Image (tube, rainbow, N blue to C red):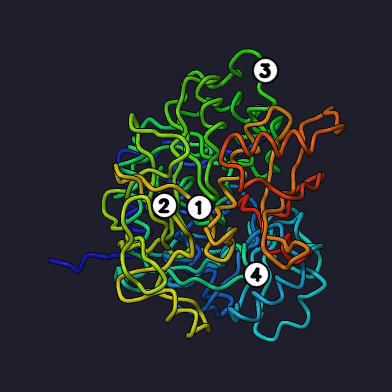
Amino acid sequence: MGQVNENAAAYFVDRHAKGAAAEKVAFTEAVDGGRSLTYAALGEQSGKMTALFEKYHIQPEDRVVMLVHDVVEFPVIFWGSLKAGVIPVPVNTLLAADLYALILDDSKAKSLFVSEVLLDVVKPVLKDRKYLKSVFVIGESQEGFLSFNDELATVQERPTTQASADECAFWLYSSGSTGQPKGVRHVHGSLQATSDTYGAQTLKINVDDVVFSVAKLFFAYGLGNGMTFPMSVGATTVLYPGRPTPETVFDVIRRSNPTVFCGVPTLYAALVSAMPDKMPNGMERLRCCISAGEALPAEIGRKWKSATGVDILDGVGSTEMLHIFLSNAPDDVVYGTSGRAVPGYQLRLVDETGAEVGAGEIGELLVNGPSAADGYWNQRDKTRSTFEGVWTRTGDKYEKQADGRLVYCGRTDDMFKVSGIWVSPFEIEQALVTHKDVLEAAVVAAMDENDLEKPKAYVVLKDAVSKEGLEERLKEHVKEAVGKWKYPRWIEIVDDLPKTATGKVQRFKLRSQ
């Protein structure tokens, strides 16, 4: 009896490419002239990557950076790298050139795969990268660079490399809600671990599903939504390479009739605000919506359910845990909470001494589960402080309710005390967005005239709102909603809030102002 190949590509790609789903569409691009890719074609094209890497002297365990939009080449390169034993490093397509230089140097990437429209962004920093040997462009061929599609056409398919479940498979760089991104190393077995837990038991993914994830594939959240979960059962993913606005998202939904929609709170708020009187076309088959990246304001969840008839399953995940480990579940949704542990994961809330807190108390969330990262690259101290045996520190503060549900309070470094009592920025933000004139809000600590910390709110208003007397109305609104001592002492109206590309508000930038 031969050795079982635990290479994740054998399970997610080869199993379907040679099975009943071979001629089924795995990925389809929801744009004019968009292309589709069947499981059989994905199997063949990803199988060519081993030969392509050999041609350009890229060895197993070498890193290759993927600066690639959500197009059909993305899964080909990602899974093809796993098949070859090469480590793909998908990165955020919205970063500045100096951060791409940092990531290319930090990862010691031998090769870069870049979408044609992103080449001009990264081109200025390519010549000084001492580890980088080759650059493949996806799209129209560019002088001085290799054409990915042309090069792939010159090589033949190879068998999938043997790998163990514990071997490093890919890296993701954390989105940097608190500063510089960190390289997070994940093993082959973690991908199936997330599909066996959240994908199968919370999302209940099935072969007939059509999934549209607004979160892009280069995020841990988007990678699970758009690749791991649908590919675990032979379902179909809708890819959209453009910027998600209410207009473009409604258009993709109309074109693709998804059964599963995956968003982030910022976008759900914008969609609810832009929702026409009747449910948008294309939502007729929608059976499940999920949210992560930041806690979902209860008001947004209720408005979405009222407009579409479908609940949003608000959940919590992280780059370090690869996907969602704490979530509301179908038929068990309580808006304003993050739900309970996903089957397969254990959670603890601890105080500053490491002691577990009781119901009604606030503590830092620790998680134990099968998809935890293997650690950070080149950041040993950070690895040791985050990964404590089987437990991973999330850096998030939660309150435990009597029924076991957890309520988000904020990042550990976002929390502050007013009159000696912990204040959750998120609680004040939730109160603010229930006001009819407020689209978004972020709250941080600011010093008053006595050098004591008090809440300060940054507020994004809906269109055509009068600002006259608004500040006092918002303060009174918060006092009535969450308590007189928690109201923001200062309110600043802004056009937008600083965010990571996952939609997380970067409160550290607001604090620095």
- Relative height, residue 24 to residue 287 (above, below): below
Identity, as a three-letter code, of the amino acid under mark 1? Cys
In the picture provided, is 486 more to the left or to the right than 396? right
Q: Which dot, 4 or 3, sits closer to the camera?
A: 4
Residue indicated by mark 3:
276
Q: Earlier in the sequence, mark 1 or mark 2?
A: 2
Quadrant location of the N terminus in the rendered image: bottom left
Q: Earlier in the sequence, mark 4 or mark 3?
A: 4
Identity, as a three-letter code, of the amino acid under mark 2? Glu
CB of mark 1 within 8 Å of CB of mark 2?
A: yes
Can you give x and y, in whole percent of width and height, for residue 61 in the image?
A: 46, 78
Q: Earlier in the sequence, mark 3 or mark 1?
A: 3
Residue indicated by mark 1:
409
In the picture provided, is 12 more to the left or to the right than 302? left
Which residue sits at x=69%, y=32%?
246
CB of mark 2 within 8 Å of CB of mark 3?
A: no
Q: Which dot, 4 or 2, sits closer to the camera?
A: 2
Look at the image and tell me whether residue 26 can be seen.
yes
Q: CA distance from mark 3 to mark 1?
A: 32 Å
CB of mark 1 within 8 Å of CB of mark 4?
A: no
Q: Earlier in the sequence, mark 4 or mark 2?
A: 4
Look at the image and tell me whether residue 32 can be seen.
no
